[in-house]
Amino acid sequence: LAEATNPLAYLATGIFGEPLPKQHGSPVRLVIPWKYGFKSIKSIVRITLTDQPPATFWNTVAPREYDFEANVNPAI
């Protein structure tokens, strides 16, 4: 939730003046500029608010390299 409400994050509904196509996450995509394309969400189908970040494939396989802090902490 903190990343989604960051002033640099935004919701995209279109690209180049056209509606967002399915391959780019139609109808709406959350764009978080500091995440790599393969780490950011592709489309929004449901919003669930939790008090803990859910486990993902990568942070389950290699938690030291792919936890949340690895994206924002240069020491990791």
Image (spheres, helix red, strand yellow):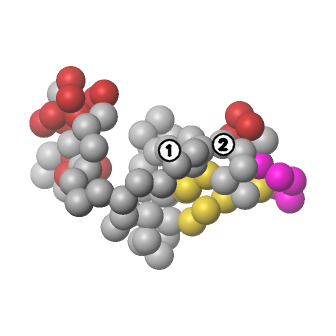
Tell me if label 1 and label 2 are in contact, CB under 8 Å.
Answer: yes
Q: Is residue 17 magenta?
A: yes
Circle 2 Cα neighbour tier, 10 Å, few/some/many (<14 / 14–19 / ≥20):
some
**Left of 37 or right of it: where is 67?**
left
- Name the residue at 48% across, 54% down: 47
- Name the residue at 66% across, 53% down: 28
Q: Is residue 20 visible?
A: yes
Residue range highlighted in magenta: 15-20
Q: Is residue 3 above or below residue 16?
A: below
Front residue of this view, candidates 10 and 46 = 46
- Earlier-in-chain disc, 1 versus 2: 2
Locate residue 54: give its quadrant. Answer: top left
Q: Residue furthest right?
A: 18
Q: Amino acid at mark 2?
A: Gly
Q: Is residue 6 above or below residue 32?
A: below
**Left of 29 or right of it: where is 74?**
left
Where, quadrant-wise, is the N terminus in this rendering?
A: bottom left
Instruction: Measure the C-alpha gap from mark 1 to mark 2.
Output: 9 Å
The x and y percentages for residue 32 are: 48, 57
The x and y percentages for residue 16 are: 82, 55
